[in-house]
């Protein structure tokens, strides 16, 4: 059962489902299932009687979370907790996604899963509390914190750069924030690889990081997007103070995928290769 199947990540699961005929998928978009509605979640889960719940649903606007903390906590914390309680009841494995926003951005190296989580703003706090609600509810679970996510679906940095790169001669892009991009299709491949190896009778309780290999700034990322897509648009480095945003954001947000590679034998592509794969097969949806 995939909740939030209309978003970037959920849509990637939907797009590849037929490649995994051994799994019977049930997709629920926001309109079809509100994860913060306990009764609704219970009905959906009983109807599917699933072995695995994949939670792609989230309140992901960092700016709007600052303006409307209740909405952010209702989905990211309470909704995650509700799914976890019903996953526990149904004896289903919960795959729950979280974010680098749980960190303060002061690390001198890519974050490992054991590093202290100190969110700076409402979005990060709501996601961190969502993780805690999942652990406390006690189902078999894997929490996967992902990096700078982009996808063929929905709105994201890569698609915005591709669009602006076709319209403009030059673009200002922030050069003082650093992290690790991750292609949503790679996240899905990794999760499906894990699901091919899990023992559903076992109880899992692990937290992982997943991002493409390598670290870059938004500026580096944008330069690479233009180069890969053969767009002549010049990218100019600027400081983040040039753009008005609500709420604090971590300066450094690279994630180390070491533990997920070790525990599940995954190969993680580097960010440049994944970007090239996305752009090569890109259908702007
Ligand atoms: N995007 C990133 O850069 C990024 C980075 C790190 C981690 N993550 C995490 O990765 C996961 C997937 O993110 P994404 O980029 O795929 O997000 P997304 O594109 O914003 O998709 C989230 C989906 O959840 C839905 N949703 C919102 N409230 C809901 C509710 N109460 N019940 C059910 N569905 C609801 C949204 O529907 P509506 O559009 O109708 O509201 C949307 O379809 C999230 O856990 C996110 O926190 C994202």
Image (spheres, grey):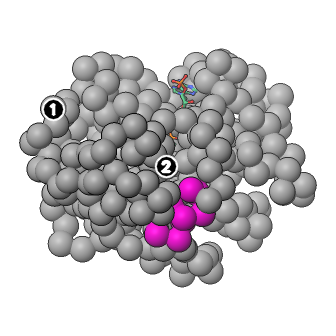
User: Residue at horizontal 22%, vertical 38%?
Assistant: 121
- Closer to the camera, 49 or 269? 269
Q: From the image, which quarter does the C terminus lie in?
A: top right
User: Residue at horizontal 65%, vertical 18%?
Assistant: 31
Q: CA distance from mark 2 to mark 1?
A: 22 Å
Say which quarter of the image contains residue 123: top left
Mark 2 vs ligand 1: CB under 8 Å? Answer: yes
| Disc sitting over residue 280 in the figure | none
Q: Magenta includes 241?
A: no
Check disc 2 and report the residue beneath it.
150
- Closer to the camera, 213 or 204? 213
Does dot 1 land on a helix, a strand or a loop?
loop
The kind of secondary structure the magenta stretch mainly shows is helix
Nearer-N-terminus badge (2/1): 2
User: Residue at horizontal 54%, vertical 81%?
Assistant: 262
Which range of residues does the magenta coloring cover?
272-279
Q: Is residue 194 left or right of residue 244?
A: right
- Closer to the camera, 227 or 244? 227
Check disc 1 and report the residue beneath it.
244
Number of marks in picture: 2
User: Residue at horizontal 53%, vertical 23%?
Assistant: 36
Q: From the image, which quarter does the N terminus lie in?
A: top right
Q: Give the x, y percent position of residue 257.
A: 45, 71
Q: How crowded is the residue under tag 2: few (<14 C-alpha within 10 Å), some, or many (20+)?
A: many
């Amino acid at each position: 059962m995939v909740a939030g199947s209309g978003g970037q990540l959920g849509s990637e699961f939907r797009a590849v489902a037929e490649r995994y005929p051994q799994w019977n998928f049930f997709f629920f978009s926001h309109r079809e299932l509100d994860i913060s509605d306990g009764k609704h979640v219970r009905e959906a889960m009983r109807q599917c009687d699933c072995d695995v719940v994949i939670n792609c649903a989230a309140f992901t606007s960092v700016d709007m979370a600052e303006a409307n903390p209740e909405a952010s906590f209702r989905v990211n914390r309470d909704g995650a907790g509700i799914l976890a309680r019903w996953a526990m009841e149904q004896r289903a494995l919960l795959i729950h996604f979280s974010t680098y926003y749980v960190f303060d951005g002061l690390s001198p190296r890519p974050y490992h899963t054991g590093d202290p989580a100190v969110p700076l703003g409402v979005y990060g706090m709501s996601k961190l509390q969502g993780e805690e609600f999942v652990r406390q509810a006690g189902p078999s679970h894997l929490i996967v914190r992902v990096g700078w996510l982009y996808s063929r679906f929905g709105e994201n940095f890569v698609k915005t750069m591709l669009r602006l790169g076709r319209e403009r001669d030059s673009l200002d892009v922030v050069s003082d924030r650093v992290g690790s991009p991750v292609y949503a299709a790679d996240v899905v491949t990794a999760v499906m690889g894990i699901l091919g190896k899990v023992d559903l009778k076992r109880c899992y309780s692990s937290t992982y990081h997943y991002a493409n290999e390598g670290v870059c700034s938004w500026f580096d990322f944008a330069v690479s997007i233009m180069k890969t897509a053969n767009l002549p648009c010049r990218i100019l480095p600027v400081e983040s103070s040039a753009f008005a945003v609500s709420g604090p954001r971590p300066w450094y947000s690279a994630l180390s995928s070491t533990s997920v590679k070790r525990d599940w034998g995954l190969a993680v592509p580097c960010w440049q290769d994944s970007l090239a794969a996305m752009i090569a097969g890109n259908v702007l949806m």
